[in-house]
Amino acid sequence: MKRIFAIIGLVILFLWIAITVVTALVPFPGKEVIFPALVAGCILIPLIIWIVLWMISFVTGKKNIASLQNETTNEQFEKDIKENS
């Protein structure tokens, strides 16, 4: 489910960026209103994708790249050393 959501999110982000570039290059009436919203979307869409992936990992209990670290680096290092000894 996470992979499907991530792929859909990437496709949406790619299309959003393509629309933003076309909007930046083509003059038309109302560009002053639409272009800032498109640029804001280029920032907000990846943030929303990360939040949703984090929520999925939180609900399922499985860690992924969006998961927050519960252990410090030193604690994880010591744990890894004990497991590999």
Image (spheres, grey):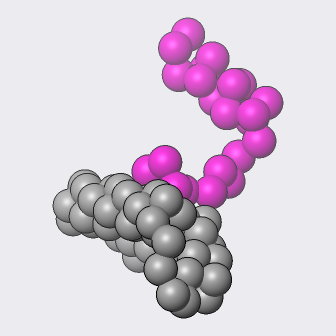
Question: Residue 72's spot in the image, x, y percent?
Answer: 77, 42
Q: Is residue 48 magenta?
A: no
Instruction: Place residue 2 in its image quadrant.
Output: bottom left
Question: Residue 22's spot in the image, x, y percent?
Answer: 41, 62
Instruction: Place residue 75 in its image quadrant.
Output: top right
Q: Observer-nearest residue: 44 or 71? A: 44
* Residue drawn at x 79%, y 30% as measured from the top left: 74
Whether residue 20 is visible here, answered yes or no, is no
Q: Is residue 60 left or right of residue 75?
A: left
Q: How many marks?
A: 0
* The N terminus, quarter of image: bottom left
* The C terminus, quarter of image: top right
Question: Residue 81's spot in the image, x, y percent?
Answer: 63, 17
Task: Classify 68 as above or below 44.
Answer: above
Task: Classify 5 as above or below 78.
Answer: below
Q: Is residue 38 left or right of residue 3?
A: right
Whether residue 69 is visible here, answered yes or no, is yes
Instruction: Place residue 19 in its image quadrant.
Output: bottom left
Q: Is residue 37 left or right of residue 63?
A: right
* Residue drawn at x 49%, y 59% as measured from the top left: 25
- The residue range painted magenta reads 63-85
Q: Observer-nearest residue: 10 or 17? A: 17
Q: Is residue 72 magenta?
A: yes
In the picture as drawn, the residue positioned furthest to the top comes out as 85
* Residue drawn at x 55%, y 81% as measured from the top left: 31
Task: Classify 16 as above or below 30.
Answer: above
* Residue drawn at x 62%, y 57% as measured from the top left: 68
Q: Observer-nearest residue: 15 or 2? A: 15
